């Protein structure tokens, strides 16, 4: 367990890590949206496609062969897991900080109680 004074800094660092992951996730999501938009455009302007089912199938085919899209999806999954782990770590630090504060208060209360007891006895 770290010292009570170190928790605010550790909590701030953990929160900043979550923000970094969020930023990376947003960038990957923009990339995914771009790939999906291009696939939608390719399917929408293909005159050989007769209905929505064919367009959806074409869109799927376009995305399926796009290796960069697949990498972006994999990255999104990885970052989502990292974000969940970062959030769990942040909550762990917050909870540890709360426990450490309570333990410090308890120690102070016990010291005061011991001091008052000694005064009553006359020591």
Image (cartoon, rainbow, N blue to C red):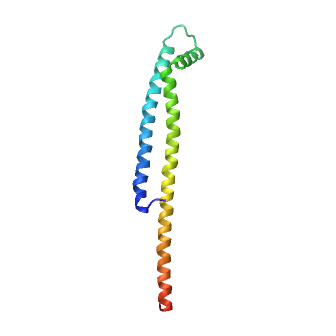
Tag count: 0
Relative vertical location of residue 105 with respect to residue 28 in this rendering, above or below: below
At a point 47% along the width and 88% down the height, the residue shown is 119
Q: Where's residue 54, x and y in %?
A: 58, 14
Relative vertical location of residue 45 with respect to residue 119 in this rendering, above or below: above
Q: Nearer the viewer, residue 71 or 40?
A: 71
At a point 51% along the width and 8% down the height, the residue shown is 47
Q: Quadrant of residue 34?
A: top left
Q: Is residue 36 visible?
A: no
Q: Is residue 83 visible?
A: yes
Of all residues, the one furthest to the bottom in this rendering is: 122
Of all residues, the one furthest to the top in this rendering is: 48
At a point 50% along the width and 49% down the height, the residue shown is 89
Of all residues, the one furthest to the right in this rendering is: 53
Q: Where's residue 80, x and y in %?
A: 51, 37
Q: Where's residue 52, x and y in %?
A: 57, 17
Q: Nearer the viewer, residue 77 or 1?
A: 1
Q: Where's residue 58, x and y in %?
A: 55, 15
Relative vertical location of residue 103 with respect to residue 83 in this rendering, above or below: below
At a point 45% along the width and 35% down the height, the residue shown is 25
Relative vertical location of residue 117 with respect to residue 91 in this rendering, above or below: below
């Amino acid at each position: 367990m770290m010292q009570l004074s170190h928790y605010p800094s550790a909590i701030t660092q953990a929160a900043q890590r979550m923000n970094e992951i969020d930023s990376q996730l947003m960038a990957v999501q923009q990339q995914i949206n771009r790939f999906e938009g291009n696939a939608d455009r390719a399917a929408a302007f293909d005159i050989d496609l007769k209905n929505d089912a064919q367009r959806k199938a074409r869109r799927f085919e376009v995305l399926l062969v796009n290796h960069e899209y697949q990498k972006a999806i994999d990255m999104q999954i990885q970052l989502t897991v990292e974000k969940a782990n970062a959030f769990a770590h942040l909550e762990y630090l917050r909870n540890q900080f709360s426990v450490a504060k309570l333990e410090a208060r308890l120690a102070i209360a016990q010291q005061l109680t011991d001091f008052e007891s000694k005064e009553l006895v006359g020591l």
